Amino acid sequence: MSQLMERPRHDEMRARLLKARQRMEVDALDYKRTLKAAADGMSQREMAALLGMSQPAVAKALQRAQSVPAVVGEFNAASPYEVCQRYAAGFIDRDELVRQLVAWPYKPTPWANEYGEYEESLEGTWEEVGDALRHELIDAATYDEVLRKTAG
C-alpha cells in the first residue's frame, strides 16, 4: 500500500527535478547570450559594477559565452533540443513547442560511418528531437505529433 502512495510523489519529484534542471540550463544560455549582447554597448567595467563582479570575472564569463550559439531566425532557441528544453522548463506551452518544432528549419542528418558514428555535427537535425524524447524533455505523443506534421 505504501508503494502506491509514494509513487505519485516520486513521479512529481522527478518532474520537478527535471523542470528545475532545464530552467537552470535555459537561464544559463539566456544569460550568456545577454552578456554577449551587452558587451556591444557596455564596457566590461560597467558590466562588472552592475553584476557585482570583478572585471576579470566578466572577461572570463564573456569568453565562456562565446561558445553559446545564437538563436535561429524567429525562434528563441539555437536548436530543436533547446526548444524542447524551454518546454520542459515551463517557458513555453505544448502548443508553442509543437508549432516551433514543426516550423524548425531542420538540417539533413549526416551519414554515419561504417561504425555507426556521425562524423558531422547533429546540431539542428531531427536527431535532436529524438534526444529530447530520450532525455524525457518531451513525451512520445508530442514526438509522434511533430513527426506526423513534419512528414506530411
Image (tube, rainbow, N blue to C red):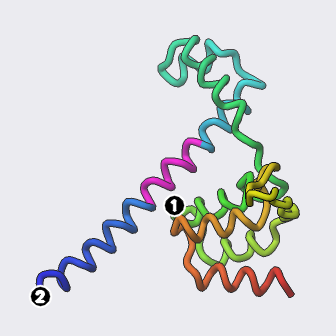
Of labels 1 and 2, the one closer to you: 2
In the image, taking residue 53 as reference, residue 67 lies left or right, namely right
**Front-lying residue, 42 or 108:** 108
Q: Which residues are the magenta region?
A: 19-28
Residue 89 — which label?
Answer: 1
Residue at 66 percent across and 62 percent down: it is 83
Residue furthest out toward the front: 114
Q: Quadrant of the N terminus?
A: bottom left
Q: Residue at x 45, y 61 (%)?
A: 19
Mark closer to the chain start, 1 or 2:
2
Q: Position of residue 149 (x, y in %)?
A: 79, 84
- Of residues 98 and 116, which is closer to you in this image? 116
Q: Which SS class for mark 2?
A: loop
- State which quadrant residue 56 falls in: top right
Q: Are marks 1 and 2 in contact (CB under 8 Å)?
A: no
Does residue 120 appear to the left or right of 139 in the view shown? Answer: right
Q: Residue at x 71, y 21 (%)?
A: 42
Neighbour tally class for label 1: few under 14, some 14-19, many 20 plus, Cα within 10 Å: many
* 78, 144: nearer the viewer: 144
Q: Main secondary structure of the magenta part?
A: helix
Amino acid type, residue under disc 2 in the picture: Met
Q: Is residue 25 magenta?
A: yes
**36 on left or right of 90:** right
Q: Which residue is mark 2?
A: 1
Q: Amino acid type of disc 1? A: Ala
Magenta stretch encompasses residue 117: no
- SS category of the residue bearing label 1: loop
Q: What is the CA distance from the residue labelled 1 to the residue labelled 2?
A: 32 Å
Is 78 located above or below residue 9 in the figure? above
Point out the image quarter for the C terminus: bottom right
